[in-house]
Image (cartoon, rainbow, N blue to C red):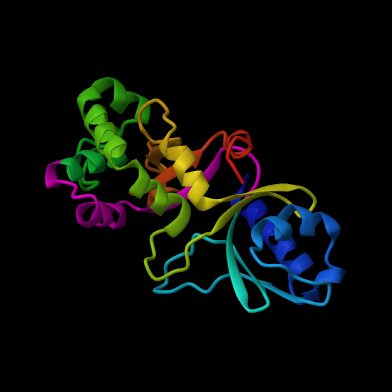
Amino acid sequence: MTKNSGFINENELIEVLNNKHIRNIDNKVKMNLLNKVCQHSFSDSDFVICRRPKQIDNVATKPDIEIIIKGISYHISIKKGSGNSVHQEPLEQFIKFCLSDICLSADDANKIRFFIWGDCTFDNSGKIYDRMSAVEIKKKYPKVINDIQDIFDKNKAKLIDRFIKQGAGKNNPPASHIFYGTKDKGIVRKTDNIIKYLTNSSLKPLSVGGLTFQAWNRNLNGGSRSENKRGHIQLKWGNIEKDLNLIDE
């Protein structure tokens, strides 16, 4: 799924919900989304507002849409397609969180930096020809990978909460639910139930529970188009549709 198609999907959901009375909303959207998300009863005459949540401190929110019915807000993360990226943030921002919230040591912080930069340095100061793919790093530096995996395994619940529910902005609203699908068909699960499921899952290194941990873009050849994407972490949820169907509502 491209970022553009994701925005189109979110806009379509906003369009079918916003500034409408319940009676005027498509039954598929009511059944697949509103009935599953709303924890209070509503009537046909109730009015719905649907919009993008406001960003606080210029940090992207984890929810993609906010639904308001009878003055009560629900913050929903929207997903579609396969190989979903569920979280991205600058490496140093993530390191700062880990140093303060999971008591990451300075030495272990450098191991994460080493993996993400992939140029045999901790600060992107290596030569372009020193840049390595994730496969190369895992083959040449298995102890680094194992040490990072051990850190993630010990802190899965707190990390997955950041990646799935809270996001990088502490003052932004957390996502209460994930909706996977479109205005015509979808599945909803509470983020608390998702966190529990993913925490009890595991993938081959490197992973945080059921999420794959990787660099957003290593830009191995040094081209100018993707150089700004280096130094960011990315979490992917490869089997999101299959897994959501296994999670309790």
Which residue is pictured at 29% across the width and 43% down the height?
155
Which residue is pictured at 62% across the width and 38% down the height?
82
Inspect the magenta stretch and tell me whether residue 84 lies in it: yes
Direction top: furthest residue: 139
Side of 37 relative to 216 (left or right): right
> On screen, 18 above or below 219?
below
Residue 70 pos. (x, y %): 68, 77
Direction front: furthest residue: 41
The reply to whether residue 150 is visible in this rendering is yes
> On screen, 216 above or below 10?
above
Residue 136 pos. (x, y %): 32, 24
Residue 104 pos. (x, y %): 19, 47
Between 196 and 14, the one nearer to me in the picture: 196
Residue 223 pos. (x, y %): 41, 44
Magenta segment range?
A: 79-107
The reply to whether residue 225 is visible in this rendering is no
Q: Quadrant of residue 239?
A: top right
